[in-house]
């Protein structure tokens, strides 16, 4: 078995190196600065060009011409220059496009006349290879320690400039789940596995394919907002946005983050991953540094958080950060969030009239705090986040505890992680280590322990700017586990390898 | 077989020699860049600026909103892979071409901005700067197009000791 695993590792390594060599060799061709753009222009386009159609190296007439960007849109209006001189057609197109991009020319001016909406699609995806390793027998019974493959992310962005100063951003994650995912009734399945598999089955019969079985996946909407730039220093977003806290939650895309798995404080959502409401944000220079801010008001968390607020308390949050370039780049930030989480339900209050009324089934107040630091200097990458989350239940709406034992307790969770890596000059390799600590506050969280420390070591290889290979071994050790409990039987160790790509 | 022909010492010698060659090549490339004509930061004549700081240039070319003398700056780049672009990115942003591509890919995934527009030729760049107040770019100091003016960077002219650009 050990030999087979070793052979497998060698094969994966060989395949990785082979892939790395091949992709490195073609890096010049696939550089993100030459990515194809929605308008079909791929000549020298800067990655992420706001119009998705940056000018090419030898691309006259300009690839950025709005008429090229949006088939069927009216041609760019020739723009009279600010100096009064007439411009040739090529320059006029550029000027019009750039003015539209910046909102120049004043309200109703040249920018407005020249503007034509643009839309571009891009995103990221990743493929994971995972295996629990060196588990104790009790853990082998609890976890599936077979080598597994899976596509964990397929995130598609639709990014549009819809009017001068207005931007739309939609990010959708496509999932193969829920089919096959562990369902909520895992407890029942272990007691009666013949009756309950413990897994979700979303298979249905495809009417157009002789009613053969087809597995249905899911869609998670990560972001969907409209943004307006009120001034260079103030933007307003309305919709569904990522909570601006710390580093990892905003980085969030697998090509960006260094390792294949999240630290506990991020995965356990000390802050909500995303919110629905309004966000104010901006940056301003402070000496040689940049000061940035985010303020959010949202429905907060709850069983219907993306649809409605089930209590009268809006969740408030914010983040302040300072970015300086004193020794490389240093970002220091602090975040806070507070809200009320309410599960408000309806019941018949008068049988005779069938009148219904609301009651709070569960309700708690939550407050989260976090601090973060990122330091990038030459090849060095250091980042660390610490967070605290308090949950205080309303005694009139304190639901039963897990397994219907007692009632939910007030709890304080805290945790941190630190990641240190160094990008070597060879093959864009970055060896890194990640230390993560999490105190869940309640023993029930880990069935006999409430604190865990995880040590991870791995390699991140940016094969090209758009392709990343990662491999990591993580050892999770439980602290203060109750004797005889599952956590007391040993550590949980996992080997993960991921290929992530941006497109 | 391999073990009979190469000892650990041989491999170490090869490694050191390889690194030395790589270092020498890098050094040569660096000297070649340094021997180039210095870059000059330019704006249209209508833009009310005479000087710009290195930190302002960094903000502008990292696509952070930047206002100088009441004008919002509109950074215009050279195409990736050009000598001007590589030298500017390295000196002002501290990023090599590969780092730069990685940086913008990451920013795009975060949803935190897009790179400045790249303009394919110096004559076109000159026309755009001349007609767009706030537009700012850089060219070799010997290739200043008509209708633009050269800014000092932190009070220094191109070629002066301590000038921020190579």
Image (cartoon, coloured by chain):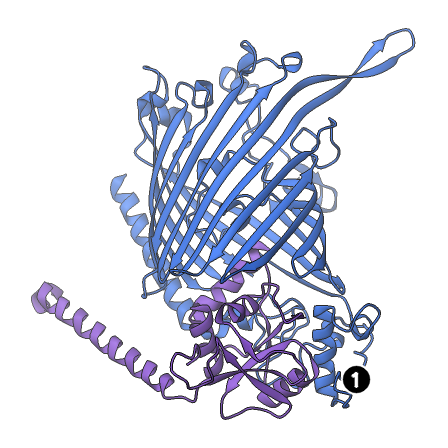
Residue that carries the numbered disc 1 in the rendered image: A80
Q: Secondary structure at mark 1?
A: loop
| Location of residue A188 in the rendering, given as x and y in whole percent from the top left corner | 54, 17
Whole-percent x, y for residue A19 in the image: 40, 63
Q: Which chain is purple?
A: B
At 66% from the left and 19% from the top, the residue drawn is A362
Farthest residue toward the front? Answer: B155
Identify the residue at image location x=71%, y=86%: A90
**The chain coloured blue in the image:** A
A480 vs A428: above or below: above
Q: Position of residue B121 (x, y in %)?
A: 58, 87
Q: Quadrant of the N terminus of chain A?
A: top left
Question: In the picture shown, does residue A400 fall above or below A453?
Answer: above
Q: Is residue B11 left or right of residue A116?
A: left
Closest to the observer, A15 or A174: A174
Quarter of the image with the C terminus of chain A in it: bottom right
């Amino acid at each position: 078995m050990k030999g087979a695993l070793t052979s497998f590792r060698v094969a994966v390594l060989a395949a990785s190196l082979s892939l790395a060599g091949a992709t490195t060799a073609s890096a010049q061709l696939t550089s993100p600065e030459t990515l194809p753009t929605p308008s079909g222009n791929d000549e020298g386009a800067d990655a992420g060009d706001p119009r998705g159609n940056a000018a090419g190296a030898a691309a006259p007439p300009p690839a950025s011409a709005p008429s090229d960007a949006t088939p069927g849109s009216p041609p760019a209006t020739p723009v009279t220059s600010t100096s009064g001189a007439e411009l040739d057609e090529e320059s006029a197109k550029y000027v019009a496009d750039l003015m539209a991009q910046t909102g120049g020319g004043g309200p109703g001016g040249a920018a407005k006349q020249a503007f034509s909406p643009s839309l571009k699609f891009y995103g990221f995806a990743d493929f994971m290879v995972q295996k629990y390793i060196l588990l104790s027998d009790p853990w082998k019974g609890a976890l599936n320690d077979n080598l597994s493959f899976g596509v964990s992310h397929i995130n598609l962005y639709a990014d549009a400039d819809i009017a001068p100063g207005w931007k739309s951003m939609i990010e959708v994650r496509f999932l193969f789940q829920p089919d096959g995912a562990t369902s909520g009734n895992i407890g029942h399945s272990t007691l009666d596995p013949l009756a309950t598999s413990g897994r979700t089955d979303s298979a249905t019969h495809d009417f157009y394919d002789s009613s053969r079985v087809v597995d249905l996946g899911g869609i998670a909407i990560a972001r969907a907002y409209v943004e307006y730039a009120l001034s260079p220093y103030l933007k307003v977003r309305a919709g569904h946005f990522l909570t601006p806290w710390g580093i990892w939650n905003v980085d969030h895309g697998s090509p960006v983050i260094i390792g294949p798995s999240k630290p506990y404080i991020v995965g356990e959502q000390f802050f909500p991953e995303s919110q629905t409401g309004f966000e104010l944000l901006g940056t301003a220079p402070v000496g040689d540094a940049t000061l940035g801010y985010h303020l959010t008001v949202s429905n907060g968390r709850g069983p219907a958080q993306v649809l409605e607020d089930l209590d009268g308390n809006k969740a408030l949050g914010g983040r302040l950060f300072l970015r300086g370039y004193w020794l490389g780049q240093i970002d220091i930030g602090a975040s806070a969030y507070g809200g009320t989480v309410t599960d408000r339900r309806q019941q018949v209050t008068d049988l005779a009239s069938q009148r219904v009324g609301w009651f709070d089934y569960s309700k708690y107040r939550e407050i989260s705090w976090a601090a973060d630091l990122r330091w990038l200097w030459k090849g060095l990458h250091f980042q660390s986040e610490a967070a605290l989350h308090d949950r205080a239940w309303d005694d009139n709406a304190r639901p039963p505890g897990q397994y219907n034992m007692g009632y939910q307790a007030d709890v304080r969770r805290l945790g941190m992680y630190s990641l240190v890596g160094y990008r070597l000059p060879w093959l864009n390799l970055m060896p890194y280590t990640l230390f993560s600590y999490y105190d869940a506050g309640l023993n029930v969280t880990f069935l006999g322990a409430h604190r865990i420390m995880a040590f991870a070591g791995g390699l991140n290889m940016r094969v090209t700017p758009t392709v990343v290979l990662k491999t990591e071994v993580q050892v999770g050790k439980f602290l203060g586990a109750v004797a005889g409990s599952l956590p007391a039987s040993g550590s949980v160790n996992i080997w993960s390898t991921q290929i992530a790509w941006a497109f | 077989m391999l073990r009979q022909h190469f000892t650990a010492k041989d491999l170490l010698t090869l490694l050191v020699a390889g690194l030395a060659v790589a270092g020498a090549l890098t050094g040569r490339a660096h000297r070649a860049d340094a021997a180039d004509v210095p870059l000059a930061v330019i704006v249209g004549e209508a833009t009310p600026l005479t000087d710009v700081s290195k930190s302002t240039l960094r903000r502008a070319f990292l696509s952070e909103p930047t206002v100088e003398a009441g004008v919002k700056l509109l950074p215009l780049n050279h195409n990736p892979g050009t000598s001007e672009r590589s030298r500017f990115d390295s000196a002002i942003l501290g990023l090599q071409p590969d780092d730069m591509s990685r940086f913008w890919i990451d920013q795009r995934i975060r949803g935190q901005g897009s790179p400045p527009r790249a303009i394919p030729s110096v004559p076109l760049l000159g026309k755009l700067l001349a007609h767009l107040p706030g537009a700012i770019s850089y060219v070799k100091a010997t290739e200043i197009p008509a209708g633009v003016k050269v800014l000092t960077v932190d009070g220094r002219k191109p070629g002066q000791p301590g000038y921020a650009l190579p």
